[in-house]
Amino acid sequence: MNRDLLRLLRLVAPFRWWIVLAALLGFATVGSSIGLMATSAYIIAKAALHPPLADLQVAIVGVRFFGLARGVFRYLERYVSHQVTFRLLARLRVWFYRAIEPLAPARLVDRHSGDLLSRILADIGSLEQFYVRVIAPPAVAGLTLALTVWLMGRFSGRLAASAGLMLLLAGLGLPWLTRRLGRGVGQALTETRARLSAALVDTVQGAADLLLSGQEAGQRQKTDRLGRELAHWQARETALSGFHTALAEMLVDWTALVILLVAIPQVNRGALDGVYLALLVLAAMSAFEAVLPLPEAWQNLEASLTAARRLFELVDAPPAVADPPEPLPPPARFDLSVRGLTFRYRPGEPPALQEVSFRLAEGAKIALVGPSGAGKSTLLHLLLRFWEVEQGQIRLGGSDLRRYRAEDVRRVMALVSQQTHLFNGTIRDNLRLARPTATEAELAAAVQKAQLDAFIQSLPDGYDTWIGEQGVRLSGGERQRVAVARALLQNAPILLLDEPTANLDPDTEQALLETIFDALADRSILMATHRLVGMDRMDEILVLRQGRIVERGRHVDLLEADGLYRFLWERRF
Ligand code: ADP
């Protein structure tokens, strides 16, 4: 059997008893329909012969029972199916999130965020249907087929054979035909939908840039084209399902005809009581309720497998960083030492860092300066274990960084980067991110040190002010102060600053740096910047160029040395 299908089945395995129950209830529903039709047909045919009422009693009870049972079973079946579906959905979302979280950011930087979004929403959404629309229908159809053949067999073997044959034709032949005709449509549909949503995310997120560069027409054409392509595949799918519906209805009518053609000679011969004729026809026709969803099940199977393949592809990507089998306890000392560090993003590429060595003692302040692309962020990301160190060594508290759990390493390092991500929530939620258990007093202390208190007091709802998606209601300086407050709350002994002032005007920049140095005076600080502000406060400045440290020392000495640092300094001021 298909490997992806097996994996999918394994994912739903914890729900197998629920699934069995739902399938049995589905079968009971169709079974009741057959029973209802059969007993009703019998009553009408029999009543025409004016028998004593007592002869009809059993059948009357049957009609009542099946009529009520059908509704009750249908309700229970829906209920259980939805239970399974939603539990499955919850499980799939968690499963997928757990799988991709360790991949971030190293393995996800190359992915389009729209593509990721579409995998999380649409692909998981189509898998949600996997159980109801793919697994359950064949089970219900199989049981119904057995029931029908058994029922017909009680009258004659030929009737059983004809009904069975017609059901198989509708259940297997029809899906086979639809699948042949619709080959690739499901896959094309899923893929086009994913491409369209990626393009739409591009359009929305890049709207300002598109307008400024006059590219909006091109982008619109691209989206239009994808929209039309999607409509084309949807039309194909709909045409196929229409064709299939027509054929299916025809098969139901033919079945009535076939049963009559087989049964009437038997009645003429006296082998079968004529009163059963209507019962046979109607019972066989109602059995179709179970086989008609099968072609759709095939189509859904194809869509589910495509979606599953796209998810597995991501889930199977090996994480860039793995935790050691026997990790050290979280570090107790926080001195950092980097020795002979050389790093390439991909084999064969020029190194982003070469032979970098330095030591950051507890409480020391070091600046990484150099032109953009020199490798400053790369170094910070290696410290945070976003990527794995291959050549050289980073030691934290005297032990190799790789021997700690990545989570423990990240807990002792706070990062303030150029772009602080603010979540769609209140100011309080956004601060608490750094320490969910922080008390009001701790929040207030951090906010005061980060000099955000006046700003928060000026907000209409104070801490409970909703700051909107990505914090669009905050200025650049305010956002960065939120990041500083978070770093304070996180209480990490090591602070990594990656161009924290890159998007700020000079006054705001100066004020923010003052805040950082005052509030975090006792922490170790490693600050990457190409703007050379606050350099006189640094214990050491490392000047990077093309991944190498080309100069190092204190601000005054470097200015005197008249090298790259002095050049950068003069160009800037
Ligand atoms: P800086 O922070 O000093 O501007 P970076 O550390 O971002 O420099 O980049 C150093 C080098 O590594 C650059 O040549 C850059 O193109 C490359 N680089 C950065 N990130 C990646 C990545 N995810 N994949 C491949 N190359 C990268």
Image: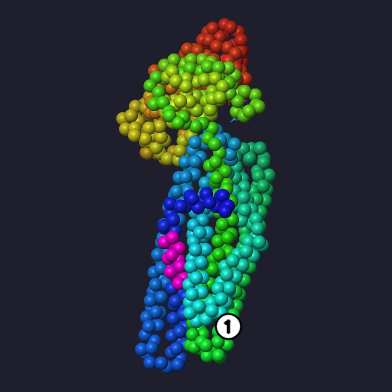
SS label for mark 1:
helix
In the rendered structure, the answer to whether residue 51 lies left or right of residue 208 reads left
Is residue 205 among what the camera can see? no
When the figure is inspected, residue 126 is found, relative to residue 550, above or below; the finding is below
Residue at the disc numbered 1: 262
Task: Report the span colored magenta.
Answer: 20-31
Q: Quadrant of the C terminus?
A: top right
Q: Main secondary structure of the magenta part?
A: helix
Amino acid residing under circle 1? Val
Total marks drawn?
A: 1
Residue at 51% x, 67% y: name it. Answer: 141
Is residue 179 among what the camera can see? yes
Residue at 56% x, 49% y: name it. Answer: 3
Quarter of the rendering containing residue 464: top left
Residue 26 on the magenta span:
yes
Pick the front one: 15 or 358 = 15
Residue at 58% x, 17% y: name it. Answer: 355
Report x, y in % for residue 303: 58, 55
Residue 492 on the magenta span:
no
When the figure is inspected, residue 14 is found, relative to residue 114, above or below; the finding is below
Pick the front one: 378 or 570 = 378
Residue at 52% x, 20% y: name it. Answer: 393
**Quarter containing ligand 1?**
top right
Report x, y in % for residue 485: 41, 28
Quarter of the rendering containing residue 161: bottom right
Report x, y in % for residue 53: 37, 90
Pick the front one: 291 or 432 = 291
